[in-house]
Amino acid sequence: MIRPVAITLVALGLWLGATPAAGAKDYRFRANERLHLAGTNIWCSIDRRGAVDVVTCLRIRAPNPTPIPKSWGFAIARTLVGVIKWGKDGNPVSVYRKVQPLGGRDAVTKGPIRVITLHLGDSGIVAGSNLAIIATRTHRAPHEPAVGVVLLASPSKLVPGSYRAEITTTRVALLKGPSTKPVYIRRG
């Protein structure tokens, strides 16, 4: 059986194959959780900003949990999507920002801080919102491991006109709607 989130993300151009990876997990993520894509320096956090859930993904230098200088990341919520660059001093700078069409709602509670290690094929929804997160390989060569985040109208449809974001160890990209062509991409 193919999970609804997996169906949606296949339609978005993220290559998953015909069935989920063996042992892939479905999660119900909550605010305050930290996600790490196994075998990479990609980390995501799910945070509450006022009344809105925000998923932020970036590359972090181990063992010091600070962003890699001159690297890129993204933040996505039901109201806004943006690309962030970290300077040599480690401070973030917003370099691209777009308003999302409103869709769904956000949760009113958050869970304890916990770290979840994602493996390729794992996916889930942020509880109480319509943000979906998946660990996969990119559609285009070299098919790098990636974390993608989308805004869903239903379990198998995007919010019309919404953006989605993906991050790999070499780039960050924003895509609009079901297109596989990025509207914004940065490498590094």
Image: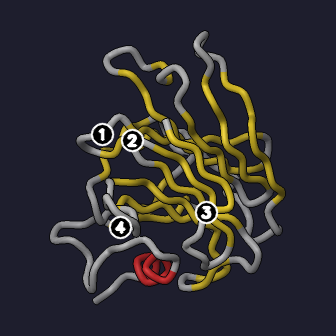
Q: Is residue 90 visible?
A: yes
At label 1, which amino acid type do we have?
Thr
Residue 81 or residue 28, whichever sits in front? 81
Marks 1 and 2, how far apart at CA: 7 Å
Q: Is 120 on the left-hand or right-hand side of 172?
A: left
Q: Between label 4 and label 2, give the one nearer the viewer.
A: 2
* Element at label 3: strand
Q: In this rendering, is residue 85 above or below 134?
A: above
Q: Do the residues bearing badges 1 and 2 touch, measured as CB atoms within 8 Å?
A: yes
Q: Do the residues bearing badges 3 and 4 touch, measured as CB atoms within 8 Å?
A: no
**Res 117 quadrant in image:** top left
Q: Earlier in the sequence, mark 1 or mark 2?
A: 1
Q: Write down the residue under mark 2.
A: 169
Q: Write down the residue under mark 4.
A: 26
Q: Position of residue 126 (x, y in %)?
A: 55, 59
Q: Between label 1 and label 2, give the one nearer the viewer.
A: 2
Q: Write down the residue under mark 3.
A: 182
Marks 3 and 1, how far apart at CA: 22 Å
**Res 115 quadrant in image:** top left
Q: Quadrant of the N terminus?
A: bottom left
At label 3, which amino acid type do we have?
Pro
